Amino acid sequence: MKEKLISEINKIRENSTFLILDEASIKSGVIQNFLSIVGWNPFDVDEVRPEHTVATKRVDFSLRINGKNKVFIEVKRPNENLELHQEQLLGYSFREGVKIALLTNGFTWWFYLPLHEGSWEQRRFFTADFFEQEPAVIAERLIDLLSKENVSSGNAIINAEHLFTGHQKTQILNDTLPKAWHKIVNDPDDLLVDLLIETTEKLSGFRPEISDIEKFLANIQSDTSIKPAIMTTKAHPNHTAPLHPPSLTGDYINKKVLHFVLLGKTYHPHTWKELLVTVSEEMCRRHTAEFDRCLRLRGSRMAYFSLNSNELKNPERIPNSKFFVETKLNSNAIVRRSHELMAMFGYKDNDLVVAAA
C-alpha cells in the first residue's frame, strides 16, 4: 500500500499537466484512485458516497462504515484557493458529527478535526503537500488517517489526535520552522510583502514601498542566529526545480537592469518585467511541447504562471503562447523566477547573467 501511494504521488509530481486539470478530473483521477489504494471501494456508494447531501448542500465524498459517515472530503481544482472553502466543509462536518474532514485540490491535502474548538485553521492538524514534502512521509500519513482499516477500527481518529497534540508534531515543527523562516526571508511571496505593507501603514500612517520591505527582511536574515544552521540544508533531489539556485546571490533591490545575457545573446530591457517576460518567451519557444511544466512554479499561496489570467495579480501574456506570467514581483524575485524556470528545462545558472546598477 505504501509503495503504491509513493508511486502515485511521484506521478503527480512529475506530471506537468496535472495543474491544469478540472475538478471532475481530480475527483476521478486522483481522489478515487488514492481511496482505492488505501482500501476503499470508490464504486460502492455504501463505502464512498459521492455528492453526499447535508441539509440543502452537498459534500463531494463521504467515507462510510456500517452506514455512518466517518470522513468528509471536499475536492477543488489545483489552482483554487482552499481557504475559501474550509468554513463550508467544517460546517458540514460539525453538523453531521464527522470527526475527520479533508479539503484537497489534489496536491495539497488539508486534514481537520471539525469537532475541536478553535478557528478553522486551528482545527487543521496536518497538511500534505505533494510538491514540497517527502512522498514516503505523505504516504504514511494517508494510511494512518484515511485507510479503510484505520477509519473502521477508530485508529484514524486516534492517529489524528496524536498528530494534533503529540510530541511528534512538536519535533517536526522544531526541525521545520528554521527552514520555513529561511525560505520566507530569502524569497518572500506577495502575501508576506502585502501583509507587512498594510500593517506598517496601519501602525504608522505611512505606506512603505516594496523595496523598504525587502531591505527589512534582508536585515532580519543577516542578523538571525539560525542562518548558519539552515544554510547547509540540501534540497531533496525530487524537487521539480531548485528553490534557491546556489549561484544566485546578487541583490537587485533598488537597482535598474542594464542588460542581461540569455544563452549567449544580450538583451537591453527597460524594466525588470521585460526580463522575466523575455526569459519566459524564450523558454516557451525552445520547449513548446513541455512548457506547461512552468505551472509547477508556485509560491505558498500564489501561482507564478497560469493559463488563466484571473489567477494572477498582474498577469502578462507570454508572447505567442497561451500562458500568462505573474509580474507583480520585485527585482530579486524576478531574477530568481527566471533562474527557476530555466532550471526546469535543464539550463544552468550561468546561462542567464544579469547586470544591474
Image (spheres, rainbow, N blue to C red):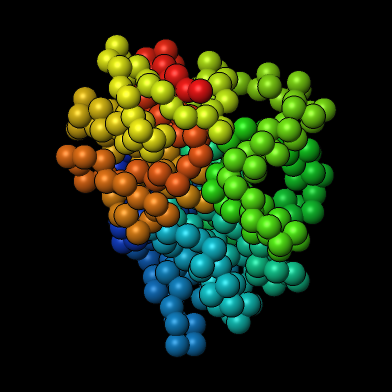
User: In the picture provided, is 65 more to the left or to the right than 318?
Assistant: right
The x, y position of residue 42, in whole percent, is 38, 60
The x, y position of residue 176, in whole percent, is 70, 36
Q: Is residue 304 above or below residue 182?
A: below
Question: From where the camera sits, is residue 124 visible?
Answer: no
Total labels drawn: 0
What residue lies at 73% left-to-right and 33% top-to-bottom?
Answer: 219
What residue lies at 29% left-to-right and 31% top-to-bottom?
Answer: 278
Q: Is residue 350 above or below residue 178?
A: above
Looking at the image, which is closer to me, 62 or 307? 307
Q: Which residue is farthest left?
A: 320
The x, y position of residue 21, in whole percent, is 30, 52
The x, y position of residue 284, in whole percent, is 24, 32
Q: Quadrant of residue 132?
A: top right
Looking at the image, which is closer to me, 68 or 103? 103
Looking at the image, which is closer to me, 140 or 47? 140
Q: Is residue 265 above or below residue 329?
A: above
Question: From where the camera sits, is residue 105 visible?
Answer: yes
Q: Quadrant of residue 310?
A: bottom left
Q: Is residue 83 above or below residue 256?
A: below
What residue lies at 29% left-to-right and 11% top-to-bottom?
Answer: 264
What residue lies at 79% left-to-right and 30% top-to-bottom?
Answer: 224
User: In the picture provided, is 6 more to the left or to the right than 226?
Assistant: left
